[in-house]
Amino acid sequence: MAAKSNGQVSKVLDGPINPMVTPLLTDLYQFTMAYAYWKAGKHNERAVFDLYFRKNPFGGEYTVFAGLEECIKFIANFKLAEDEIDFVRESLSSSCEDGFFDYLRGVDCSDVEVYAVQEGSVVFPKVPLLRVEGPIAVVQLLETPFLNLINYASLVATNAARHRFVAGESKMLLEFGLRRAQGPDGGIGASRYCYMGGFHATSNVAAGKLFGIPLRGTHSHAFVSSFMSPDEIIDKSLHSSDKRSTCEDFVSLAQTWLNKIQWSNSLNGTFGETNQSELAAFTSYALAFPDNFLALVDTYDVMRSGIPNFCAVALALNDLGYKAAGIRLDSGDLAYLSSEARKIFCIIEKEFGVPGFGKMVITASNDLNEETLDALNKQGHEVDAFGIGTYVVTCYAQAALGCVFKLVEINNQPRIKLSEDVTKVSIPCKKRSYRLYGKEGYPLVDIMTGENEPPPKVGERILCRHPFNESKRAYVVPQRVEELLKCFWQGPGGVREDLPPLNDIRERCISQLAKMRPDHMRRLNPTPYKVSVSAKLYDFIHFLWLNEAPVGELQ
Amino acid sequence: MAAKSNGQVSKVLDGPINPMVTPLLTDLYQFTMAYAYWKAGKHNERAVFDLYFRKNPFGGEYTVFAGLEECIKFIANFKLAEDEIDFVRESLSSSCEDGFFDYLRGVDCSDVEVYAVQEGSVVFPKVPLLRVEGPIAVVQLLETPFLNLINYASLVATNAARHRFVAGESKMLLEFGLRRAQGPDGGIGASRYCYMGGFHATSNVAAGKLFGIPLRGTHSHAFVSSFMSPDEIIDKSLHSSDKRSTCEDFVSLAQTWLNKIQWSNSLNGTFGETNQSELAAFTSYALAFPDNFLALVDTYDVMRSGIPNFCAVALALNDLGYKAAGIRLDSGDLAYLSSEARKIFCIIEKEFGVPGFGKMVITASNDLNEETLDALNKQGHEVDAFGIGTYVVTCYAQAALGCVFKLVEINNQPRIKLSEDVTKVSIPCKKRSYRLYGKEGYPLVDIMTGENEPPPKVGERILCRHPFNESKRAYVVPQRVEELLKCFWQGPGGVREDLPPLNDIRERCISQLAKMRPDHMRRLNPTPYKVSVSAKLYDFIHFLWLNEAPVGELQ
């Protein structure tokens, strides 16, 4: 155990959350290549790979980086089990030599180094999220699991942050997506990374247990329709909140309140007959959870049945010293219904002298996404909390982030990947990267440099060049310089950064997003954040490019 | 252990593939409702829920049902562990009574019945995929995990089937999506259900091990660019295929062939200098896998470098009695490049007398989806195998299927869920459903009936009614009647259907798809398949609807 730079002693890490994340969770070609490297005696050549994406998702200009902790836990425990080696042997050609499988038996990540941006950071295209260095055959085996663990995590954290941005900071965001997620840990990962991106709670109990995320949930339409009428409620008694008295017939108390509401002057005959199965369900739910009564009011008819039934039960609870929590709307015109519900709550507060009744929490759900949230804001609404499912967890607007993993150096030789499409050309060399901040405290530009170049200095002018467009360049005098890649792994005993708790990562994410210049963040036509390379790196990229690209012949 | 109707003895089932699928993988409200049911003494009331979807995905008119095996394995092992019960206790209100947690401790699925459509079947909106019956509190706990396990599985199996339909039956389809999938078992589930939907192989090694799916994969661009030149290859010897002779310098042999190609008359100076790092990589890969040489040819330039380098190495292998497997194209104009590559292969077959060289397998990848496959077909191409990743596994065109789980009966009382939106009204009653086939062998219509109605009979005319549109109805004289819901669970010792092996499910899926009337299957403007109810059920739905819906008042 080594002392760590930040004072902490590095300790043995658990494996990834999902036990299915094993060294076999990779593409077959990583093993065929490992064999070919081994056969050529190249497997221990030291290689550097960058993991990065080329384009921000959802038509935006920022991305939240997530998934790092799982990657580090994965490599800390990377070891092929005997049955896994047997399976690889079966899957490769029968002509593969035994020595390779002996080699695989000894493979671990003790000789691998991972430098990464801190999880929860705001990140941009082309700048490495991870720089992974080690024996080429081993690092290649990590490619697919790293991409798998980072692509979706970053995508869904970004999606959550975008939804939070549109909903507004004062609103509570609840992730309700488990049932529509892409598989079990599509659901569990979604809950974790939505929380990281700024959501406040989830309905997913497993995620609550695994990650300590606050849980929310009350009842469904089926609960309401499972009741027939209040007659079927057998135990009708309810203690008062202070336990000093007992109401022997809470069902009648609620019924009495319903009558009062129906005959109230201020409500002026708004309400007629309500659905009795709904009233029975609400009363039953209040008897079970008198201190946390929140009712789904749209099973039959929100304004004619759900709202008066809810108010009756809430007022009955109020008589016994309990405060009802609120309602949930799951269909219809949420702007209209929330505003109407608010009006009724305020009228009741006045008419019956129940302080705070007007401030009842209104939760809305039903296929919400960035567009519908934006439309609700434009119409005006009285919703306090949004339950968002399908659109946030499946990243419906763009279901994949395209992170890639590219070789940038081998045996100290820089490598470049060319492409007809200039956006797909990789930036060669083992690099460092920095975020430069301006006078107003906003990040101005990210800059990549060769590993051995001197770092940008506060107050010193530096030329930042677009990596591929020679005419795009700018001088910057940074007021603050932040090195982006930090060491998260250099073997099991190595000095490395902490893996902070989820709440700290969430705080980092929220505070970094808040510090971005607003024009990068807007939903429509945001300004791209600048990503650059040093003048020296620029020259080297273009020297290497010309060197590698074949000269065409026009015929 | 009970004897089964199909002669098999039911046996203890393993749990779900992903150990994260536990009773806590559910929404909190399932537990709050369970408590409220328990508190009201309603928890053991017998309830029937239907699991179904409302709309086929991807603008199509069919869906492939998948995920059933995982559901059955889940309920066969459903039991809350002590730490899970403790966590539920912490998550609910502190006022919840201890007796509830004692109750939870005893909960299992021995009193639950699951009737389901067979996995791999072609299915349609509104018709139950599962009918789940049991004590209401227990069945509600199953809602979220069942939806989670079925929604994505069915979506991705359908997506795979659609891709196969466009690619054409003669093409090989490879699933390469692990790196872009929504989390680890987004990847593992995708591999399983793409195979079920008609794909032929996957790159995902873990899925290969878990499910026996054939594996495919060769090498990446990084492998190519990790080499500098053929000089670095140390062990240059290669045995002939029959082991009778050894070529001591395979590198020179490949180089010699490259010169021959460059100076060939028929190729007429097509090729100039090729990239030496690529030639080194191909030669190395061939030395590692002489009997399965498949090269990625687009790292530098397909026509100027990749193809001639590949042909040189393939011809060198041919000298030693090996047949090269083919090439992969991962960028550029796949229609053009595959056709040009085919031409070269055919010329080489002739010029150098290498039988079969022209039939070399050409694999294409690079962001393929239904549209690009369709466009390739229209242009004409020479691709034999498609590697499809992101678009198939993340279901990019539509990232979620909206299966729902609705209460249709409690204590033998039919229940209906109303909605302003008629497509969201549920079909009440514990039901049976049948597929009726016409003279030409095609399925004509699915019909739902009440549980105790006599089943439709072959040769007897039956009226099939649209469930909600009174003017849509048709008489059908079925030539074959297939009951759709079969018993897959009635407690651990109960008689039930087998859970067939993956390959059988895949066969069912492929053969059912082949038997559909072609107009339901086409990609653009397909004809909707008819889904209906019996006359008796129609009348009952509308009786119940009128009974439950409040009468409006216009003011």
Image: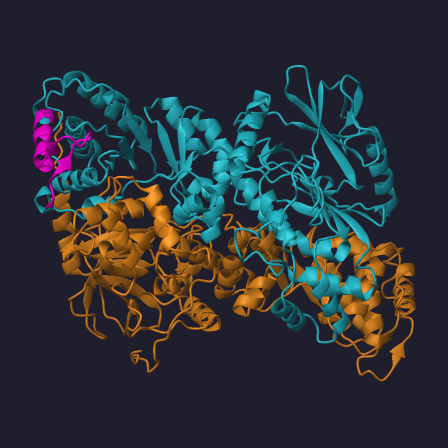
Chain colours: A cyan, B orange
Q: In which quadrant of the rendered image does the C terminus of chain B lie? A: top left
Q: In which quadrant of the rendered image does the N terminus of chain B lie? A: bottom left
Image coordinates of residue A173 in percent, x first then y, are 41, 33
Give above or below for A480 relative to B521: above
Q: Residue at x 43, y 60 (%)?
A: B521
- Whether the magenta-drawn stretch holds residue A248 is answered as yes
Span shown in magenta: A233-261
**Residue B236 occupies quadrant:** bottom right
Q: Nearer the viewer, residue A24 or B428?
A: A24
Q: Is residue A396 visible?
A: no
Image coordinates of residue B330 in percent, x first then y, are 69, 54
Q: Is residue B469 visible?
A: yes
Q: Residue at x 35, y 69 (%)?
A: B442
Image coordinates of residue B324 in percent, x first then y, are 76, 71
Looking at the rendered structure, the number of numbered marks drawn on it comes to 0
Q: Nearer the viewer, residue B65 or A365?
A: A365
Q: Nearer the viewer, residue A216 or B346?
A: A216
**Residue B512 occupies quadrant:** bottom left
Give above or below for A401 relative to B237: above
Q: Nearer the viewer, residue B272 or B439?
A: B272
Residue B44 is left or right of residue A524, and the answer is: left
Image coordinates of residue A261 in percent, x first then y, are 11, 25
